[in-house]
Image (spheres, helix red, strand yellow):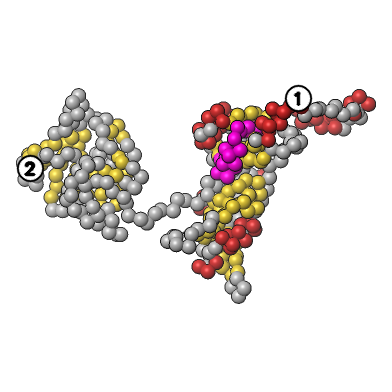
Amino acid sequence: MADDVINSLENMKLTTDEEEVIEIADEGRKDEIESCTLSLIGKFLTCKSFNKRAAISTLKKAWGLEDRVQFVEVGSNLFQFKFKEEFDMERICRSGPWTFDNQALMLIRWKKGLTARNVKFDSVALWVQIWGAPFDMISPNVATAVGSKIGTVEDVEKKQKHEARNIFMRVRVSIPISKPIRRGGFIAGSDGVRSWVNFKYERLPFFCHYCGILGHDTKHCASYYAASKNEGEVVCPYGDWLKAGGVRSTSPVKRSSSYSASGSKNRGPDKVCDNTGEVMQSPAAQGKVTANPKGDDGYVKETIASMETAPKSKGFNAVQEGRDMSVTDTRDMNHGKLNSEILNSNGEEKEADTPVGHVTENVQVGLGT
């Protein structure tokens, strides 16, 4: 409705008074100019409606700036983010893409003359991983050359020569939203030998698996609709395989429990750790842990699954080479005491002075059911 009114006004013949330019002095709007100078204009790349309050709340938490940024709605799906510090604004620009409900937030810097009518968003910045290049072509210069064919290069990862891992190259590219994302491309050296490299996109937002364009899915794709209408079943040439997954580290698990990779019996704190932090067994919660000293790589491997609310008393099975035992946790919820009953292979009870969860030999343990 508003756009129709504006378009009709543009086609009208203006009066002499309407053609007069109203001069605005800078003195009376110093604060406004300063706040705009440290601001970004943003728009979510989406064809769907979304909860604006939830989106702003999510961004506030993700940015961690609290009162150091002001969120102002300046149009339909159009926001101005006013920062107090230039450092914060630059960090937000460099750390993207920012998303809400997998919908990318496009950001541009404010400049004089921008209005809700003339502001244009034509790209979104993403980190692109380049896989499969010949060993002698894995370098920042090659990454920059490849990235320039994807979009406008904003940054490139420069690895140190002594780094042990050099599986792929990374380049941050401002990608046009009007074109399909590229799945890969050929590169060639001076000898003319071509090599295909695959592209994977980090934090890849909402995109169409049929046409490859960001911002909509097949349900909102006119090309997909036309193809399905004429051809019936349609094969999508794009997919989630373009998303870059986390690269799993091959370093051994760091341990702070009482046994080492070789299964030594040195006693230590009664806790189980993975390489990210401790998992504490509380009376009200019980995790699921698998310890496998006989992993393929010779290291102790641990898997921490989801935490579940446990009843007052919970049993678990422990399988050791040559015999079975059942341990029942009868922790006194009022005093925090722990008593364990262990059945040996003959079915006889014996007291256990080792706290539940402490393993002193090569065993496989499954907590829970």
Position of the N terminus, as image quadrant, is: top right
- Label 1 crowd bin: few (<14), some (14–19), many (20+), radius 10 Å: few
Position of the C terminus, as image quadrant, is: top left
Contact check, label 1 and label 2, Cβ < 8 Å: no
Identify the image quadrant of residue 103.
Answer: top right
Q: Residue at x 90, y 27 (%)?
A: 20
Tag of residue 101: none
Residue 150 location (% of width, % of height): 63, 55
Q: Is mark 1 on a helix, strand or loop?
A: helix
Please name whichever residue, 51 or 225, is drawn nearer the observer in this view of the structure.
Answer: 51
Residue 147 location (% of width, % of height): 61, 57
Identify the image quadrant of residue 117.
Answer: top right
The verdict on residue 95 being magenta is yes
On the image, numbered disc 2 is attached to which residue? 347
Q: Which amino acid does label 2 sit on?
A: Gly
Q: What stretch is highlighted in magenta?
A: 76-98
Mark 1 or 2, closer to the camera:
1
On the image, numbered disc 1 is attached to which residue? 28
Instruction: Measure how far apart labels 1 and 2 are at the Cα level.
Output: 89 Å
The verdict on residue 77 being magenta is yes
Residue 48 location (% of width, % of height): 61, 36
Specify whether 190 is left or right of 12. left
